[in-house]
Image (spheres, rainbow, N blue to C red):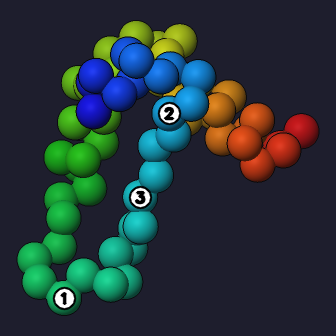
């Protein structure tokens, strides 16, 4: 994930399928998934791009 964020910071999005309606086995630990994202994207400005700016541009949010 870190390599993807570093290579394409303007095209990377973070998404989840919470509350995981299609999981039939063990549920993913959402806390661990969030921790993994923060480890892979430690810079606050880059996190903003991935979580806010890139989705806004892609989906046309104002």
**Residue 52 placement, left or right of 8:** right
Q: Which of marks 1 and 2 is in front?
A: 2
Position of residue 4 measured from the top left corner of the image (x, y, whole percent): 35, 28
Crowding at mark 1 (Cα within 10 Å: few <14, some 14-19, many 20+): few
- Residue 10 can be seen, yes or no: yes
Q: What element carries label 1?
A: loop
- Mark 1 in CB contact with mark 2 (< 8 angstroms): no
What's the CA distance linking mark 1 and mark 3?
A: 16 Å
Judged by depth in the image, the label closer to the viewer, 2 or 3, is 2
Mark 1 / mark 2, whichever is N-terminal: 2
Q: Residue at x 38, y 73 (%)?
A: 19
The residue under the point 40% across, 67% down is 18
Quick one: which residue is furthest to the left in this view?
Answer: 26
* Structural distance between the alpha carbons of marks 2 and 3: 13 Å
- SS at circle 3: loop
Query: Residue beneath label 2, please?
Result: 12
Mark 3 crowd level (few <14, some 14–19, many ≥20, 10 Å Cα): few
> Does residue 35 sit above or below 45 in this rendering?
below
Rendered position, 5 above or below 25: above
Residue placed at 18% from the left, 46% from the top?
32
Q: Is residue 33 left or right of residue 22?
A: left
Question: Which label sits on residue 56?
Answer: none
Q: Where is residue 51 in the image (x, y as percent from the top left)?
A: 55, 35
| Image disc number at residue 16 | 3
Mark 2 residue element: loop
Residue 18 higher or lower than 59, as above or below: below
Q: Contact (CB < 8 A) between labels 2 and 3?
A: no
Return the residue found at the far right: 62
Q: Residue at x 89, y 39 (%)?
A: 62
Quarter the N terminus occupies: top left
Would residue 25 appear left or right of 35 to someone viewing this image? left
Residue hosting label 1: 24
């Amino acid at each position: 994930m870190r390599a993807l964020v570093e290579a394409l910071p303007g095209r990377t999005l973070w998404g989840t399928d919470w509350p995981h309606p299609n999981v039939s086995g063990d549920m993913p630990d959402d806390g661990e998934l969030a921790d993994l994202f923060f480890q892979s994207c430690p810079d606050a400005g880059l996190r903003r791009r991935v979580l806010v700016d890139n989705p806004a541009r892609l989906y046309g949010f104002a």
